Image (cartoon, grey):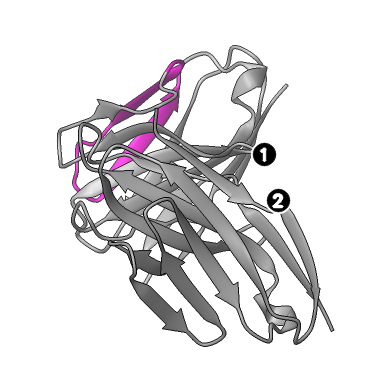
Amino acid sequence: EDQVTQSPEALRLQEGESSSLNCSYTVSGLRGLFWYRQDPGKGPEFLFTLYSAGEEKEKERLKATLTKKESFLHITAPKPEDSATYLCAVRSGVFNFNKFYFGSGTKLNVKP
Amino acid sequence: NAGVTQTPKFRVLKTGQSMTLLCAQDMNHEYMYWYRQDPGMGLRLIHYSVGEGTTAKGEVPDGYNVSRLKKQNFLLGLESAAPSQTSVYFCASQPLSNQPQHFGDGTRLSIL
């Protein structure tokens, strides 16, 4: 069964304190792993797509990496405006090619 | 550029009432999706559409119906609302099957 698990559920950091969020997955034929940011009362906003193990993407203080079993979202020197819930989703390409499986998210709180 | 617009933003229903949630996108995207988001459970797919006039069941379709009569609109109907359907509902659209989804800001639905 396709499954996506994110950890930790919540993370509190001081401004400038770097850390990583984890997204582990078990899917039949990965066709893409997606990272989203969700602010309170808003819909998820796309950040990155990763397609194959070893791939990396960067955007400002965020860097996403992918292995065969998990993805990490590294946050370098975070600022309070990075506070949000970060979601990962995987697309399985065997039978359910239009279905995305979402993790339950990591709620990040960056204190000034 | 409006993107994905959901109507209404908030609604309170009584058990047994029916209602329709509207999703409209102005990006000419082929694929559209309806999700529900509940605390600790992540986004779960209700129904989706791969083009005008098509619909398919997702992970949690029971109690919901959908229609996509026009490419830009995707309607989600609750025939007889139940308290278990209290949730935040998100609509998403997608240009091609392996590209990221674009989300609306959600409809917060409470069923008493």
**x and y, in percent, of residue A7 in the image:** 64, 52
Between A92 and A28, the residue placed more toward the observer is A28
Q: Which mark is residue B5?
A: none
Is residue B96 covered in magenta?
A: no
**x and y, in percent, of residue B14 in the image:** 67, 19
Between B105 and A73, the residue placed more toward the observer is A73
The residue under the point 20% across, 51% down is: B97
Left/right of residue A80 with respect to residue A105 in the rendered view: right
Quarter of the figure with the N terminus of chain B:
bottom left
Is residue B66 covered in magenta?
A: yes
Looking at the rendering, the stretch of residues picked out in magenta corresponds to B62-78
- Residue picked out by circle 2: A9
What kind of element bears circle 2? loop
Please say whether residue B105 is visible from this viewpoint: no
The residue under the point 42% across, 46% down is: B91
What kind of element bears circle 1? loop
In the picture shown, does residue B49 fall above or below A49? above
- Residue picked out by circle 1: B40
Left/right of residue B40 with respect to residue B65 in the rendered view: right
Between B110 and B60, the residue placed more toward the observer is B60
Q: Count neighbours of disc 2 (C-alpha within 10 A) and say few if under 14, some if 14 to 19, many if 20 or more.
A: some
The residue under the point 24% across, 36% down is: B68
Tell me where residue B49 sits by quadrant: top left
Between A58 and B36, the residue placed more toward the observer is A58
Q: Count neighbours of disc 1 (C-alpha within 10 A) and say few if under 14, some if 14 to 19, many if 20 or more.
A: few
Residues tagged 1 and 2 counted as in contact (Cβ below 8 A): yes
Q: Amino acid at mark 2?
A: Glu
The answer for how far apart the CA atoms under marks 1 and 2 are is: 9 Å
**x and y, in percent, of residue B53 in the image:** 15, 34
